[in-house]
Image (spheres, rainbow, N blue to C red):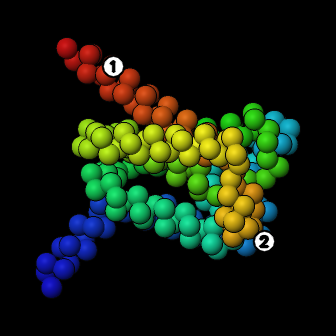
Amino acid sequence: MDNLHTFIHTKYQENKYLLLLTLIMLACAPSAISFEWLALRPMVETKDFFSGFWKLIFSHFTHSNWPHLFINITNLVILRLAIKEWAIDRSIIIFVVYSALVISIGLHIINSLTSYVGFSGIFYSLLIYILLTYRKHSPKLYSFAIIIVALKIAHEQWYGASSVLSQLIETNIAIDAHALGVFAGFSFWVLKKLFLSKNKNSYV
C-alpha cells in the first residue's frame, strides 16, 4: 500500500501542471455560453481584439464540441507517454501563455478566421518545443519526428486540412494556428537557449 501511495504521489508531482492544463480545458468545456464568451475573434478591429484580453489565452482552452476537446486531451496524454524524458514544471504555464499570445496575435495579423477555439495550436507549439529540447536523448527519432511535423504543417498549408476531422469537430480546422504554434514553440526554444547561454557566459 505504501508503494502504491508513493507511486501515485510521484506521478502526481511529475504531472500536476499537465493535469492543471487538462482541468482548465474541462472547465472551459464546450457549450453555447462558453464558446461565444471565450472564442477568439481574429478579424475584429485591433482595439476590440485586445479589449477581450482573456480570449487571447482562454480561447485556446475551450472547444467547438466534445470530440474536439477529447482529441486534444488525448494528444496531450500521448505526448506525455511518448516523451518520457519530459520534465514538466511550472515553466509550462509561462510557455502556454507565451504560445497562446503568439498564436492569437498571429491569427489577428493573418486575418484568416472569424472565430477560433481549441488547444491544437498550443499542442503543436508544445510538441515542437519538446522534440527540440529533448532531441539529444534520441537524436535520430526526434529529428525524424520534427521533419514529420514540418511536413504535416506544409501539407496543411498547401492542401488544406482533413474534411473528415472538420466534420467531427464541427468547425474548420485552423491550419494557420497549427503553423503559428510551431513557430511559437520554435521561438520559445530559441529564446530559452539564448537566455541560458547568456546567463552561463555571465558567470564565466
Identify the residue shown where x is 65% and y is 46%: 156
Q: Can the viewer see residue 140 in this picture? A: yes
Residue 44 left/right relative to 67: right
Give the total number of marks visible in the rendering: 2
Which quadrant is the C terminus positioned in? top left
Q: How many C-alpha atoms fall within 10 Å of the one at disc 2: few (<14), some, or many (≥20)?
A: few
Mark drawn on residue 129: none
Identify the residue shown where x is 32% and y is 27%: 196
Identified by mark 1, the residue type is Lys
Q: CA distance from mark 1 to mark 2?
A: 48 Å
Whether pointer 1 and pointer 2 mark residues with C-beta atoms closer than 8 Å, the reply is no
Which quadrant is the N terminus positioned in? bottom left
Q: Report which quarter residue 134 is drawn in.
A: top left
Q: Label 2 belongs to which residue?
A: 32
Q: Indicate the position of residue 170 as horizontal and vertical percent values.
A: 75, 67
Q: Earlier in the sequence, mark 1 or mark 2?
A: 2
Q: Label 1 belongs to which residue?
A: 198
Please state which of residues 22 and 125 is positioned toward the viewer in this rendering.
125
The vertical placement of 89 against 72, above or below, is: above
**Hey, which residue is sitting farthest bottom in the picture?**
1
